[in-house]
């Protein structure tokens, strides 16, 4: 956990920083605004304002999906145990998920500045939860052992087409999954050092 810096004085008036995205094709957009009173949000039928001093946690992560290989997520929690998620992409059509890298980054950076300016304590974490990350590493290890066994067998029986296929699959798997695992390594961070790997 990290101590928020600054005094208990009111946060300066909002500069109008807003962010919105559509989590699915149906339903309204999720809308957020940084106001002088706190983080204002409209998520479906749920809306409200969380004072910056009540924000108790922020988790940044890298969450690619099949439609968009570069997608980031921020999970915000408050002192009452409520949580909201902010994604860096928005749905445009059935086949198009649009990135909003610049707007997402600007909003997340400004949110950290405002939360840092009030008294209180907050947990700033990046990546996956440790137990999920460790389980992922275990699965990757098992897959790597299985692929090494298949590769050795293919070489032993002279199936060079199979060797090329397995090697290509291993390279693709390592590129896709390796990047996800490296970016999402569990960590704590501070207001002065936001993790670059978890922001667009």
Image: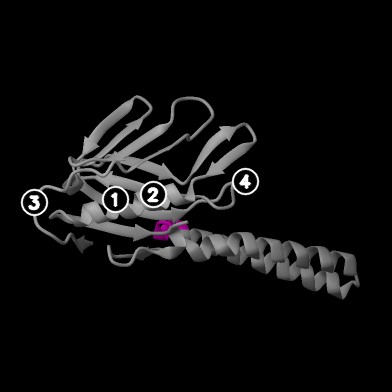
- Foreground mark, 4 or 3, reads 3
Badge 1, how many Cα within 10 Å: few under 14, some, many 20+?
some
Secondary structure state at the residue bearing disc 4: loop
Mark 2 → mark 1, Cα distance in angstroms: 11 Å
Count of marks placed on residues: 4
Q: Residue 94: in sight, yes or no? A: yes
Residue under numbered circle 4: 66
Residue under numbered circle 2: 74
Residue under numbered circle 3: 9
> Looking at the image, is mark 4 or mark 2 earlier in the sequence?
4
Badge 2, how many Cα within 10 Å: few under 14, some, many 20+?
many
> Looking at the image, is mark 2 or mark 3 earlier in the sequence?
3
Is 48 covered by the magenta stretch? no
Mark 2 → mark 3, Cα distance in angstroms: 26 Å
Mark 4 → mark 2, Cα distance in angstroms: 19 Å
Query: Magenta residues?
Result: 128-132
Task: Assess whether mark 1 and mark 2 are in contact (beta carbons under 8 angstroms).
Answer: yes
């Amino acid at each position: 956990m990290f101590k928020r810096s600054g005094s208990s004085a009111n946060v300066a008036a909002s500069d109008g920083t807003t962010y919105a995205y559509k989590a699915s094709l149906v339903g309204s957009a999720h809308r957020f605004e940084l106001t002088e009173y706190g983080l204002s949000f409209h998520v479906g039928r749920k809306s409200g304002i969380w004072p910056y001093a009540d924000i108790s946690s922020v988790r940044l992560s890298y969450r690619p999906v099949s439609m968009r290989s570069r997608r980031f997520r921020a999970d915000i929690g408050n002192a009452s145990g409520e949580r909201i998620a902010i994604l860096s992409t928005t749905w445009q059509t059935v086949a198009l998920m649009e990135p909003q890298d610049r707007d997402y980054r600007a909003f997340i950076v400004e949110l950290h500045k405002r939360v840092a300016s009030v008294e209180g304590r907050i947990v700033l974490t990046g990546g996956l939860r440790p137990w999920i990350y460790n389980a992922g590493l275990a699965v990757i290890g098992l897959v790597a052992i299985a692929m090494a066994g298949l590769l050795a067998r293919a070489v032993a029986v002279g199936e060079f087409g199979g060797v090329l296929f397995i090697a290509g699959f291993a390279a693709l798997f390592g590129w896709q999954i390796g990047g996800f695992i490296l970016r999402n390594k569990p960590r704590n961070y501070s207001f002065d050092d936001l993790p670059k790997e978890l922001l667009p």
